[in-house]
Each structure stands twice: as C-alpha cells, then as structure tokens.
Amino acid sequence: MTSAPPLTTGQVELPAALAHYDTELRRVLHETAGEEHQDSAAFVPRWELPHPSPALDAFFAPSTISAHPLTEHHGRRVALLHLMHNPRTRTTKTYASLVIVARAVAHIERTGERVVILTPSSANKATALRDAVLRAHECGLATPQALGIACVVPSSSRAKLWRSALSDDPDLRRTNPLTVLDTAEPGKVKELARTVTDTLSPALHREHGVRLWHSLELLNYAVADTARALFERDRLPAVPRLHAHAVSSAFGLLGHFHGQRHITGKQWPDTSAGYFLVQHLGTPDMVSSLYHDRFDYRPSWAERDGWLVQDHDPHFPRVAYAPDEQLDATFYTRQPATSPRMNEIIRRQGGGGIVVSLAECLDRYPAVRSLLASTGVELPADPRHLREWSLVMALTGVLNAIDRDLVDTDDILVHGSGSYAAGDYEAVPEEHLRPVADAGELALAVREAVS
C-alpha cells in the first residue's frame, strides 16, 4: 500500500455550501442546460437561480457539508462525508431539493407563472422537496399561492414521511397534497407521476396558468451534488479516493462525477476517484449488473441452522434472513436506467460494489454506532428505532468489502446520505395522507391543489 496522507486529521466543515459555491453553481447550471435530453414538450424551468439576496442565502442555509475521520481498518482509512445536516430531513436530498425549488422560484420571478412540482418518491425525496418548498415560503422567495408541490409515494413508505406545516395546515395540505399509492410494486409511483404530468400539464397551464414540473430527472440532482466534488477539491487532500454510497439509482455518485467533470473540464476526469456501490437484497440490481451484466443475478443460498448462507460470491452477503429482504423501503428502484452509465464509470475509473443483509448490518451496528459518535450522527441504541438505514448500510458494506479484500484504495470516503430514528421526527398523521388508486385520482388531487 502507498503511504498517502490521511484523508483528514479532524473535522472539516463548510456551512451553507450551496451559498458558498453560488458562482460555480450558476456556472454548472449554465453548462448543464446544454446536456438536457428531456422531451421538449414537458415543462422544465431554465437552469438558473434567483438573483443573489439575503433571502436566497437564508434558503440555502441547511446545505452544510462536513468530513470526519472514522477509523483505520486493515490499513484502509475510512472517513465520513456528512450530508445530513438539515434537521428537518437528515438526508442528502436537501441539496438537490433546494436547487430544484430555487429554479422554480426563478421561473416564478421571471414569468409570474405559478409552479407546482410533481414528484414520485419512496419518502426522502418527498420530505426534502416539501421542506424546500416550505423554506421558500418561510424565506419570502415565493408565496404558497405561487409555489406548491404534489407527491406520490408507495404505501410501504408512509411511516417515513416527515410531518410539517405543509401537512398540518388545512390550506397548505390541500395545495400541497401528499398522496399514497397502495401497491405491491413501489416503482409504480414513477409511472403514475409521469402519466399525470404528460396528460394534465397542458390543461393546467391553459386553465389556471400553472406549470406542472415533473422533477425526477437525473440532471436536476446531479447539479446540486457537484457541491460534493467542490467541497472535496477545497477541503480534502488531493489523493486517490474511493467514494462509497448506499444507492438505489446512484444519483449522488453520478452527481459527484458530474462535479469532477466540471472541475477538470474533461469528460473523463483524471482525479483517481473510484466509486463503490452498496445495496441491499431487496434491490441489488446495480451490483448484479456491474459484476454479471444482468439485473436478475442472485447467489445460490444454502440453509444452515435457520440462516441463509453462501460463500462463493464475496459481493453478496455471507448470511441473510431472506433472499429478497427489504432492509429499507427507500431503496425501491428496480433495473435503474443509470446502471449502464455507473458500470462504465466504475470500469474506467475503478471501484466496485457490494450487497449487504440485515443480519450483517445488525452485526456491525454497535461498531458503526461507536464510529459515528464523534461526528454528530447519533444512532439509537436499539436498531429497531432506526428508520433510515442508508448510512449503516454504507458503512457495513465498506467494512465488509475491506475484510474481503474487495477494495484497493487507501482512502475511502463514505457519503452519509441519510440517517434518522423514530425520535428525530413525527410521521405525517394517517388522516393527512391522501390515498390514490390510479392516475385519475392523482390528477384529481393535483387539480384540486391548483384550482
């Protein structure tokens, strides 16, 4: 192994990163406009932000980023990229949500048109976008009449939805509907949102002057996640580094790569950045694709003393409770369209992937909790109280990968994309959720929100 300097000798923090990188962020937005491939018939705001102002600075305040050394494990240095500083979400979805909502605000300011964001979500995107919309109201960037949001989530995620003024206030609840689809296939919410956007948008604009924006698009998230690469450039030593992330579609890692392209001006940045995917058995599609060129690969399990065990594929769990266990409802995307691109990046730049089980996460849980104690991320003593498993998954996967000699980089930066427990939030009361069974009922909820 090479003897590189440590990733960081102590905590490194950048408050309000999106405000700090305002100039570069606007340049990234301008560059990204030329990469957009969406259907030209769909409404998309310009890739621009509102003019700089104290209100915009206050709006971007929750976008703090920090880095923390965690441990040296078998000669590999492991550190945390803390992306969970917003106490109203505790996930990295805050950064992209703030930029998405800021673009909507810029459109409202420029045209006077109303904007309603429509997003499917497994919970965290909905919570973060709703928080960003509420912040825009609170900071005076847009009125509740001008800016709203409609969300559709699968029923399996309802307990992860955070209560806020958008759900408590009767008027805001009607104009910002939080709808729930009862389905055995969580990915159906994406189809529903796209159908409603395509069919309803023209009528809403014609009848009410409202722009309906389907915001679930990779580039919308990649732009904000360039802040991770900018922070790394300015705050961390320039050494070969492996970026590890618990992923569903790997938007965060693709955003970091987008940022490295911006920084270097190259399609393939020569920065020695590798990428490492961590998934769970419920949706291991990206790891399956990376190593087997197919989404449906699964290892052969043997049963031993009530456990499922296998030792022929080091990229899958050694032990599990069930072959398709759902560790966290947030990770619900099957056969993500981003997988081929992520495979290309890893095969060219280095990295890999691993799948973890609930049993492995529980086995590592006390050690992971101890590692995080100095970072400000507090895991509950009882793992049954944990509601967002992203960070525990990522650290478990990295430690397992080191033990199995699956990584060859000295410095590993774990992107802390989400961690919260039952005591960190109140779930949206059941009576404040609106059940929908199909596109027609979702369209009705959106119509009632804008009329």
Image (tube, rainbow, N blue to C red):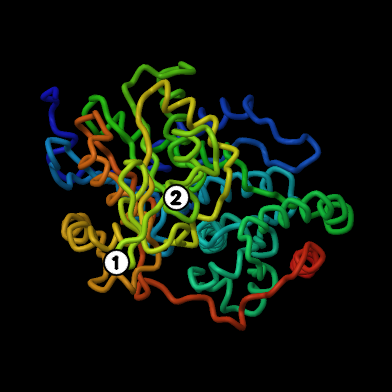
Question: From the viewer's perspective, is residue 391 above or below residue 379?
Answer: above
Disc 1 marks which amino acid? Answer: Asp
**Is there any visible trace of residue 61 in the rendered image?**
no
Report how far apart the C-alphas of labels 1 and 2 lie in the structure: 52 Å
**Residue at position x 58%, y 50% from top?**
101
Look at mark 1 in the image and give the residue it sits on: 305
**Residue at position x 47%, y 52% from top?**
93
What is the number of the mark on residue 209?
Answer: none
Q: What x and y, as percent, mark residue 345?
A: 45, 26
Q: Say what secondary structure mark 1 lies in.
A: loop
- Tell me the quarter of the image containing the C terminus: bottom right
Q: Nearer the viewer, residue 331 or 326?
A: 326
Quadrant of the image occupied by residue 276: top left
Circle 2 packing at 10 Å, graded few (<14), some (14-19), many (20+), is: many
Q: What x and y, as percent, mark residue 326?
A: 46, 62
Q: Nearer the viewer, residue 294 or 172?
A: 294
Look at mark 2 in the image and give the residue it sits on: 60
Callout count: 2
Q: What x and y, as percent, mark residue 235?
A: 25, 34
Q: Say what secondary structure mark 2 lies in.
A: loop
Q: Nearer the viewer, residue 53 or 143?
A: 143
Q: Is residue 451 left or right of residue 334?
A: right
**Is there any visible trace of residue 191 in the rendered image?**
yes
Disc 2 marks which amino acid? Answer: Phe
Q: Is residue 242 left or right of residue 24?
A: left
**Residue at position x 44%, y 76% from top?**
426
Q: What x and y, as percent, mark residue 339?
A: 53, 36
Disc nearest the viewer among 1 and 2:
1
**Residue at position x 54%, y 81% from top?**
429
Q: Earlier in the sequence, mark 1 or mark 2?
A: 2
Instruction: State yes or no: discs 1 and 2 in contact (Cβ < 8 Å).
Output: no
Q: Nearer the viewer, residue 25 or 84?
A: 84
